Image: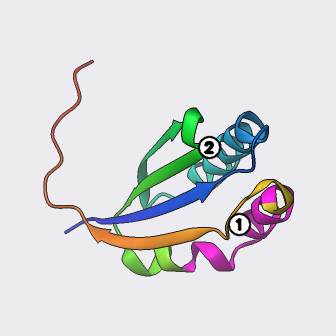
Amino acid sequence: MAHVGHSWLKTKPGSYKKVCDRYHQFASEVMSHNADLHDVIIVGNQAQNTIEGFGIWDNPAHAAALEDTKDFAAFIADVTNDLAEPYHRNDLDLLYRMNPKP
């Protein structure tokens, strides 16, 4: 069964776009050198200043180790002052994955 790493960020007012852009950069960096990471979906609600990311991994250990990487440390260092709350993460089991339409 695949594993889903889920993270949630609440930004300070006025920082939403900056954090969204940096989160996108972080996800691109991680995908470029992690063959176990198949998909990343980043969603947000600007009115609530919230951003959520879902990464679909083959290996739960690789997903769990993400927070110990230089990519993650650089991402958090870049956005910490723009967050209204600490970074949140939880782990989910992927129950169903439908084939996306082209």
**Bounds of the magenta span?**
65-79
Residue sitting nearer the eye, 93 or 18: 18
Q: Amino acid at mark 1?
A: Phe
- What is the chief secondary structure element of the magenta stretch? helix
47 is within the stretch colored magenta: no
Q: Amino acid at mark 2?
A: Asn
Disc 1: which residue? 72
Count of marks overlaid on the render: 2
Residue at 67% x, 80% y is 68
Image coords of residue 82 (percent x, y): 81, 53
Above or below for 54 versus 42: below
In the rendered structure, the answer to whether residue 4 lies left or right of residue 19 reads: left
How many residues crowd around disc 1 within 10 Å: few (fewer than 14), some, or many (20 or more)?
some
Q: Determine which quarter of the picture holds residue 1.
A: bottom left
Q: Determine which quarter of the picture holds residue 79.
A: bottom right
Image coords of residue 98 (percent x, y): 15, 40
Above or below for 32 versus 20: below
